[in-house]
Image (cartoon, rainbow, N blue to C red):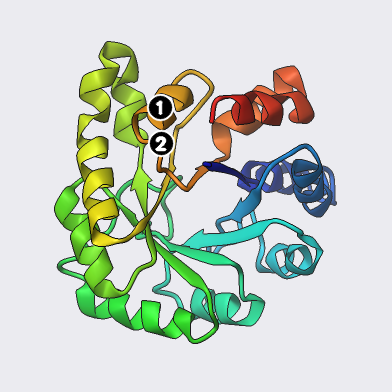
Amino acid sequence: MTKLSVNINKIATLRNARGGNMPDVTLAALKCEEFGAQGITVHPRPDERHIRYSDVRAIRPLLSTEFNIEGNPTPQSFRDLVMEVVPDQVTLVPDAHDAITSNAGWDTVANKEFLSGLCSLFHTKGIRVSIFIDPKPEMAVAAKACGADRVELYTEAYAARYSDGREEAIAPYLRTAEAAREAGLGLNAGHDLNLDNLAYFIRTIPWTDEVSIGHALICDAIYMGLERTIKEYLARI
């Protein structure tokens, strides 16, 4: 069964826009769990423009579901945070420090030495490692060679092309998902998945272990409320 991990970065963005502690990011994470989410995702960046390192430390001991920290592992501060907090999963994302959002997957061939070292490091703490990749089968195969446990498919292109032809949009993702499965990797997916395109993705690639959804889910929650929104997403997986 595919699990829903709610990315709470946008809640932190709203808090930081005004200062103070409204909305309360920790309470939001706990409410997401209460309403049925099977995981919580955070993506701390060095400038702490949304999730702060202090949020990560505060949230970790309170969660009863899976905790996923995603981000660029190049800064030592990120690696130190992951090793300190010990989440269930770390997702390695090659986003630039000034990127608005994640915008590409790793080249797991060119970065094999770097990624292999990170997988070994995080495995010493028993942390599952997922590598964020574009929908290219060779990137999944190379991620396995790096020592990854899972890959996360960067689904922005699927979402952008969905309305023009969903069969064509999902084709490279299906090929990559099959390559990941053949290599013995678990499979995650995320970026721009929403209530319109999520169900078809899961029907086509039913062995998806987890979807991480933040921006669209929080936007929907403005109109429908957080509890109903999470239930709507769960209904589609």
* Label 1 crowd (10 A; few <14 / some 14-19 / many >=20): few
Which residue is pictured at 69% across the width and 65% down the height? 56
Q: What residue is shown at x 24% (from left), y 60% (from top)?
A: 183
**Residue positioned 73% across, 66% down in the render:** 60
Q: Amino acid at mark 1?
A: Arg
Relative to 228, 89 lies left or right? left
The Cα atoms of the two marked residues, 1 and 2, are separated by 5 Å
Q: Which residue is labeled 1 in the image? A: 203
Q: Give, as a three-letter code, the residue at label 2.
A: Pro
Circle 1: element type? helix
Can residue 44 be seen here? The reply is: no
User: Would residue 23 be found to the left or right of residue 151 on screen?
Assistant: right
Please determine whether, in this image, residue 91 is positioned above or below residue 203.
Answer: below
Q: Position of residue 156 (x, y in %)?
A: 35, 35
Residue 236 shows which numbered tag?
A: none
Look at the picture and state if 121 lies above or below 104.
below
Residue 26 versus residue 190 in the image, above or below: below
Label 2 SS: loop
Q: Which mark is residue 206?
A: 2
Q: Position of residue 139 (x, y in %)?
A: 20, 56
1 to 142, vertically: above or below = above
- Tag 1–tag 2 contact (CB < 8 Å): yes
Measured as percent of width and height from the top left, residue 237 is found at 53, 31
Q: Is residue 66 visible?
A: yes
User: Which of the two residues, 48 or 187, is positioned nearer the viewer here?
Assistant: 187
| Residue drawn at x 63%, y 42% as measured from the top left | 10
